[in-house]
Image (cartoon, rainbow, N blue to C red):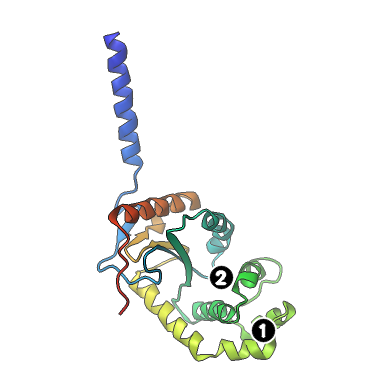
Amino acid sequence: MLKRVLVGLVMVFAMGLAQAQAQPVAGVEYRELSPTLPTDAPGKIEVVEFFWYGCPHCYNFEPIIGSWIKKLPKDVQFRRIPAMFNEEWAQGARAYYTLEAMGELDRLHKALFDAVHTGDRLKVANEAALTEWLVSKGVDKKKFAAAYHSFSVEGKLKRAAQLTQSYKIDGVPAMAVNGKYVVNTDNMKSFDQMLSVTNHLVEQVRKEGVKPAPKK
C-alpha cells in the first residue's frame, strides 16, 4: 500500500514538473519590452499580429489565426499591423490601410492575400496592378486613388513603421501582447505553438491586471 502511495506521489510530482517545464519562458519563447508600449485598446488586453502580404508564412498563418480570433474572450482586442522594413513592405502596408479607410478590409483582406500567393501572383507594390485588381473586385478606381494617397493613410504608415521598430520586430508573422510581450518567432516550431505562447501571455497579463500604458 505504502509503495503504491509513493509511486503515485512520484507520478504526480513528475506530471507537475512536466507541466512547469512546458510553460513558456521569458527570453526563450517570448521577450518582455521595457518600457511597455501604449496600446489602442484601453481596458482590454491587446494582441497584435505583424504581417506582410508578400510573406508566404503570413499567408499560411492567416486561416489559423482567423479561427483563433473568433474564439477570443471579450477582454481581448485583436488588431493587425503591417510590418514595414523597406519600400516594398511599405506599399503592402499602404494597400492594407487604404482598404481599411474605404471600409473594404473585411471583404478583401483574404482575397488580396490569395491574389498575391495563388494564380494571380499580384504585386501589391505595383500600384497600377493593384488598382486593376481592386477594380475587378468592384472597388471604385477614383475613390481608391484618393484614399491610397490620403493624409490619413500616410499617418498610419508612419505609425506602423514606428511600431515595427518599437516592438523590435525582425520577421513576420509576429505576435505581441498588450505592448509588453513579444513572442520569439525564431524559437517557434509551429503556428500552433506561437498561438499557445500568445494565449499564455494573455493569461499572464490578465493575472497581472490589465494596465494599458497611456498614449503619449
Residue at screen point 35% across, 37% down: 19
Residue at screen point 62% across, 67% down: 110
Give how far across and how far down residue 24 sits, in percent: 34, 48
Asked which quadrant contains residue 75, the reply is bottom left
Q: Identify the mark nearer the N-term, 2 or 1.
A: 2
Give how far across and how far down residue 77 sits, in percent: 45, 63
Q: Amino acid at mark 1?
A: Thr
158 is higher (above) or lower (below) than 190: below
Furthest residue to the top?
1
**In the structure shown, which secondary structural element does the residue marked by tag 1 occupy?**
helix
In this view, the residue in front, 61 or 12, is 12
Picture disc at residue 131: 1
Tell me the quarter of the image containing the C terminus: bottom left
Q: Is residue 28 visible?
A: yes
Residue at screen point 33% across, 56% down: 205
81 is higher (above) or lower (below) than 177: below
Which residue is disc 2 drawn over? 54
**In the structure shown, which secondary structural element does the residue marked by tag 2 occupy?**
loop
Is 3 left or right of 138, judged from the image as shown?
Answer: left
